[in-house]
Amino acid sequence: MALLKREEWQGFVRDVDWTYSYVDDEAVYPEWLSGTGKVPREAWLGWEESYKVSYPEYVATQREKETAAYAVKAALQRSATFDQLDQGWKSATKMHFGGVALVEYAAVLAELKMARFGLNGSWRNMATFGQLDELRHAAITTFFGHEFVGKDPQFDWTQKTFHTNDWVAISLRNLFDAMMTAPNVVDLALQLPLTFETGFTNLQFVALAADALESGDVNFANMISSIQTDEARHSQQGGPTLEILIEHDPVRAQWVVDKAFWGSARAFSALTGPAMDYYTPLEHRKQSYREFMEEWVIDQFVHTIEQYGLKKPWYWDEFIRGLDIWHHALHMGLWFWRPTLWWRPKAGVSKDERAWLAEKYPNWEKVYGDKWDVIIDNVNANKVEATLPETLPWLCVTCHLPACNATQSRDGTWRVRDIKLSYDGKTYHFCSNGCRQIFWKDRDNVNHETLIDRFLAGQIQPMDVGGILGYMGLTPDVMGDDPDYEAWTRDYVGRAAEGAAVAGA
Ligand code: MN
Ligand code: MN
């Protein structure tokens, strides 16, 4: 029997589909999972991915990628590279392993849902490859992180994070459950492949691989690059889905993309922001977080949505202003509540580092300088206990991150505002107007309880910092602390004493 050429069979196998005669279409593709909404069933026939792949090609390529990544890992296993890595970079990797490994697994379930309920055969075919990709990412990330558990127990959170009630885990679960676990597949394709993967992670993984190489972490760079090549392929499920939805229901398309972009941007400001502008050693920084967001995320995202006929999200001005604010405030919060983290946050506010921050963010000294000065003087006066938390910060009901964004008042001062909403006999608090608006529009959805809700309801006992840390699953060997206080306080030794002398005179 003669073998068919690729072009002779590819067209048939990639979109196998048929009309059901024994059951209703609705029984096979129920609306709450397939989510067609105002889009007529037959419109999905036009769904087409731009990059087509067959199963034999897929397997051959993936096999090569796996072999390459594991070969480098094996070669480096006995080297001392890990011990020489900068603590700031190690923190960035711990944050990545813990914050991402099980999100890759959640993405397996998301891809499987599209593989089952997508209303076009080629889409289901692409998603089948997508779920194999994500299974590989979950495996490679947990495996690579696991190697270091013997050297540093914080790496144990690669697998542990999402099994705990740590506040970072709650915030990320809230984001990803809404993005991947709960939605119908149309909303899912707009939120995960289109917005989060095309808009954020794909580019961040490229930048992260470069940072890893710069920091001498070849192993991590290799892992990240290997993952990114898969993401680049399966993220293309977003475009064709958006094209069809926008034709029949542009309002829904706009809302879903806006919401996913906002949630992704909040999470990025908490994790990527501090890693880029504070944890990365000064000599290895290529660009600031703001510059990264402008060049890689914003330009690209705006170009993409305008190409499809969507508008910039309604919150655009607030989001752009936030690029100078959000991640600096969250960094300070992460550092102050450092016992609640599974990494060692580096304060990163020596004189040189501050000069860099002030150059990249002209308002930095005005908004954050005096707060860090108090912390620095306390450290230099041997009062580290004054720099540790005694209670919890107020957490935003929508993003579950601390409500700590300063905004500028008309008199020029910067203040953290409480953004409130009274609804159904309850007052809700938010970090920003964007989070408030999203909560309002989605108010009938089930939301995760914030850590504050749980605390006030008496779910956390005893009601003190010890009780809170226990509830979050943090053990003393894992609790985060600054890796090197002296590194960023020695520039200011004597300053507090001078100040006191002047005040005394
Ligand atoms: Mn992935
Ligand atoms: Mn993915």
Image: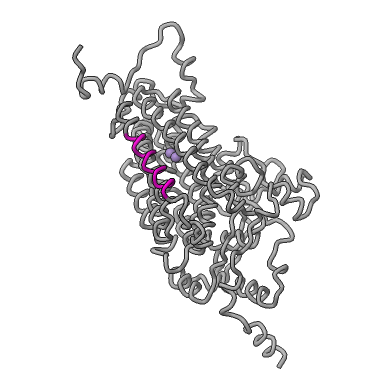
Q: Nearer the viewer, residue 254 or 63?
A: 63
Q: Is residue 10 left or right of residue 157?
A: left
Residue 383 locus on image (x, y percent) = 71, 73
On-image quarter of the N terminus? top left
- For the rendered model, the colour scheme is one colour
Residue 198 visible, this angle: no
Q: How many marks?
A: 0
Residue lying at the far top of the rendered structure: 22
Question: Which residue is pictured at 69% across the width and 47% down the height?
Answer: 472
- Write down the region rendered in magenta: 61-75
On-image quarter of the C terminus? bottom right
Residue 478 locus on image (x, y percent) = 65, 53
Q: Nearer the viewer, residue 478 or 310?
A: 478
Prevalent SS, magenta region: helix
The answer to whether residue 398 is magenta is: no
Residue lying at the far right of the rendered structure: 462
Where in the image, quadrant-wise, is ligand 1 located? top left
Q: Nearer the viewer, residue 450 or 242?
A: 450
Q: Quadrant of residue 502?
A: bottom right
The answer to whether residue 67 is magenta is: yes
Question: Which residue is pictured at 73% across the width and 49% down the height?
Answer: 470
Q: Is residue 49 above or below residue 400?
A: above
Q: Is residue 79 left or right of residue 58?
A: right
Residue lying at the far front of the rendered structure: 78
Q: Is residue 442 above or below residue 119?
A: below
Q: Is residue 113 above or below residue 66?
A: above
Residue 54 locus on image (x, y percent) = 30, 27
Question: Which residue is pictured at 53% across the width and 61% down the height?
Answer: 87
Residue 264 visible, this angle: yes
Q: Is residue 99 left or right of residue 45?
A: right
